[in-house]
Amino acid sequence: MDQEEPREAIFISHASPEQNMFTLWLGAKLAAMGYEVWADVLRLKGGDDWQRKLEQAQAVVTENNADFPEAVLTPLNIEARTADEFIADTIALDEGKAVAAIRTLRTRLTRPEMSAEGYLRSLEAHGLFVTASLLNNHIESI
């Protein structure tokens, strides 16, 4: 049996315009980690066949799992995850590389500059409590 090519695309779903800023923020973080990111505020446009793009994705990052039932995603080998679950799991795959990438992201913040503690508070403000807790173990490195 041929092994399936690993997917490196992430589909971000959000339910309302109020979540656009978070989607942009999360999309930038995932893109910096090397993922191809699809979301309506980033790359999908009206009339795009998003369902076909979804079939190419590794995961759906959403806070609204009801829109992506397991019965639809399982046959496609796609998993729906919250942003916090997805980011924490991605960090856990290679904590050293992830912490280095996150340090680079944090140090690029210049207006205003952000301390490591401030960065973790920012993650929590975006609802990324598991991610912030995981990174708290590396506070001296980020």
Image (tube, rainbow, N blue to C red):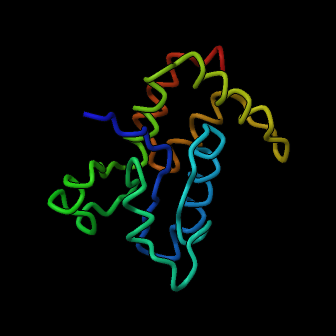
Closer-to-camera residue (97/6): 6
In the image, residue 24 above or below residue 50: above
Find residue 15 and report its image quarter: bottom left
- Location of residue 65 in the rendering, given as x and y in whole percent from the top left corner: 27, 60
Identify the residue at horizontal 42%, vertical 64% (top origin): 13
Residue 137 as seen in the image, left or right of residue 71: right
The answer to which of 83 and 112 lies nearer the viewer is: 83
Residue 101 vertical placement versus 38 (above, below): above
Q: Tell me which residue sits at (27%, 69%) in the image.
A: 67
So how many labels did they put on this image?
Answer: 0
User: Residue lying furthest bottom in this view?
Assistant: 47
Q: Quadrant of residue 60?
A: bottom left
Q: Dividing the image into 4 quarters, which one contains the C terminus?
A: top right
Left or right relative to 8: residue 60: left
Decide: is 141 above or below 111: above
Q: Residue furthest left?
A: 71
Percent position of residue 61, x then y:
40, 53
